[in-house]
Image (cartoon, rainbow, N blue to C red):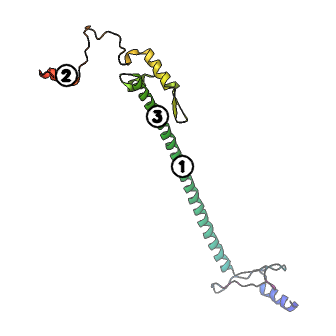
Amino acid sequence: MSEEAGAGAQAAQGDHGGQVPPQQDGGQAPPQQQAGAGGNGQDGTADTFPRAYVEELRRESAGYRTRAQTAEQQLTAAQQAAEARLRDAEGRATAAEQRMNELTISNALVAEAARLGFHDPEDAVRLADTSEVKLEGGRVLGVDETLKALAAKKPHLLKGRGSGDAGATGAQHTATSMNDAIRAAAGRRS
C-alpha cells in the first residue's frame, strides 16, 4: 500500500479512534471495511462498522441469548419433571413388589394351613408369628415351622383336635349337613 493510500485511510477514519461516525441520515448501511488493506485487523488496523449495524447485531445477539436461556430453563424444568416421574415410578414399583411378596407369603401360608388341617387357614395366617417367614429366590421359607408352632400353641384351631368338651351343656356334637338341618326345621326327613 502506498503512503498516500494509508494517509487517505487515516483521514477517512477521522478523530473517532478507528470507528466510523454514526450516519447522519439515520439509515442502515451495509457493513463496510474502513481500515487498511485486508481489513481484518491482522496488520495492526481494526475493522469498523456503522453503529446502527453493530447495534442491530447486538440486539439480535441479545435475542438469541434470551432464547437460549429460556430453552435452558425449559430443559432444566423438563429434566426435573422427568426425574420426579422416575422417582415416583420407582416408588410405585417398589411398593408393588413389596405387596406381591406379601401376597406370595400369605398364599403360601394359607395353602400350608389348609394342608395341615386348620379350620380356617386365613385365621391361622392372621394368628401365626410370620416374622421368620422369608421369600428368597422366589421360594417361601419357614412356612411349615411357623404353622406347626401355631398348631402346637393353639391345637383347637385344627380340625379333629378339639378340647373334648363340645360345649357348656356337655351335649354331644353330631355332624349334620346344612340340608339335614333345613329339612329337620321344615319337618321333613331325608
**Residue 17 position in % (x across, y down):** 79, 79
Residue kind at label 3, given as amino acid type: Thr
Q: Which residue corresponds to mark 1?
A: 86
| Nearer-N-terminus badge (1/3) | 1
Disc 2, SS: helix
The answer to whether marks 2 and 1 mark residues whose Cβ atoms lie closer than 8 Å is no
Query: In terms of secondary structure, where does tag 1 sit?
Result: helix
Seen in the picture, residue 3 relative to 143 is either above or below; the reply is: below
Name the residue at 50% across, 39% down: 97
Q: Which residue is mark 3?
A: 104
Q: Specify the amino acid type for callout 1.
A: Leu
**Foreground residue among 101 and 162:** 162
Outermost right residue: 3
- The residue beneath circle 2 is 180
- Residues under labels 2 and 3: Cα distance? 39 Å
Residue lying at 82% horizontally and 78% vertically, measured from the top left? 42
Is disc 3 placed on a helix, strand or loop? helix
Mark 1 Cα-neighbour bin, 10 Å: few <14, some 14–19, many ≥20: few
Q: Residues within 10 Å of mark 2 (few under 14, many from 20)?
A: some
Residue situated furthest front in the rendering: 190
Classified by dominant secondary structure, the portion drawn in magenta counts as loop
> Is 161 displayed left or right of 175 in the figure?
right
Quadrant position of residue 112: top left
Dividing the image into 4 quarters, which one contains the C terminus?
A: top left
Left or right side of 76 for 4? right
Which residues are the magenta region?
29-39
